[in-house]
Image (cartoon, rainbow, N blue to C red):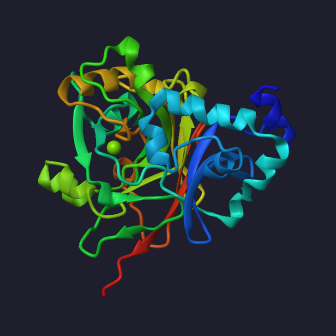
Amino acid sequence: MNFSLRVSIVGDNAGRSRELKLVRYLHSGVESYGFLINDEVVGLPVLSKVLRHPFPLNLERLISLGVEGATAAEELMRISPEDVRREASLRVGDVTLLAPVLSPPKIICLGLNYRDHAEEAGAKIPKNLIIFMKPRTAIVGPNESIVYPSFVKKLDYEAELAVVMGRRGKNIPVSDVEKHVFGYTAFNDVSARDIQFGDKQWTRGKSFDTFAPMGPCITLAKQIPNPNNLWMRTRVNGEVRQNSSTRNMVFSVYEVVHQLSRVMTLEPGDVIATGTPAGVAAFMKPHPRYLSPGDMVEVEIEKIGTLRNAVAKESQN
Ligand code: MG
């Protein structure tokens, strides 16, 4: 029995997603991970225990096994009898989804990597990658708050497709990049524009705690054979602000990974946020429409899903 047939047995309705999506979650105070299939999560450590099938106990370890890890996860699902899989399943509403990568070795971000965004910013199309890095302390998961720092005046969002690396590499040829990518997730490159534009150097304005929401899942790389043909949207309080496609990237996903690997060794778990399209608050006409406490920001990317984060005022404690 192949996997797609098994998924259909779970109760998949027409039009619902069938991508293989890995999530990290908390249930009854215990962290675990598994596949998200429609409204259920299937815990892979539970499956492996019941089936006495050796398997990584956490998602970081699985990611470090790269493409082989992704294949092993599929295989574990494939060999699981229906009753065991049901036993290992939880309703997604009964768990707390966590950021799929909590402590990546690096978070590398691309600046001005969309033609439509460079145009709205009045910037030239870059000839080389423009990169900066975020600290891992900025990461939050789905449904966690983006904390609006007390001394920031212009808070903005940036929907981005993020690559999760699965294999160490330096000088990776474009033709080999596919073998190094574990999967893809949605990322919000939250930015304090007053600080970013004032400093010129972008790190301070983009590195506050909670300025790197990511999730809700990692879609396995083999499910996205062409990462440069995915639609993406941002909604703020339900209003569409960004509506574009990864087709509009200046440097394609594989080119980005190749070029970055000429600079630095890429490692399993590294997250590469590949830039944002047009529609950020800073360049809205007739005037910017920045985020405020209480706003709900949703970043949705085809084949991945929707990352939701509310904006909260910083507590003055
Ligand atoms: Mg960005």
Image height of 99 relative to 185, above or below: below
Q: Position of residue 16 (x, y in %)?
A: 76, 40
Q: How many dots with numbers? A: 0
Q: Position of residue 62 (x, y in %)?
A: 49, 40
Image height of 79 relative to 56, above or below: above
| Location of residue 114 by image quarter | top left
- The residue closer to the viewer here, 57 or 317, is 57
Can I make out residue 285 in this image?
no
| Location of residue 206 by image quarter | bottom left
Q: Quadrant of the N terminus?
A: top right
- The residue closer to the viewer here, 250 or 1, is 1
Rendered-image quarter of ligand 1 = top left
Which residue is found at the position 70% from the left and 37% from the top? 77
Q: Position of residue 131 (x, y in %)?
A: 23, 37
Which residue is found at the position 20% from the left and 51% from the top? 203
Side (left or right) of 32 relative to 140: right
Side (left or right) of 34 relative to 11: left
Image height of 5 relative to 241, above or below: above
Q: Position of residue 165 (x, y in %)?
A: 39, 34
Which residue is found at the position 35% from the left and 77% from the top? 314
| Location of residue 6 by image quarter | top right
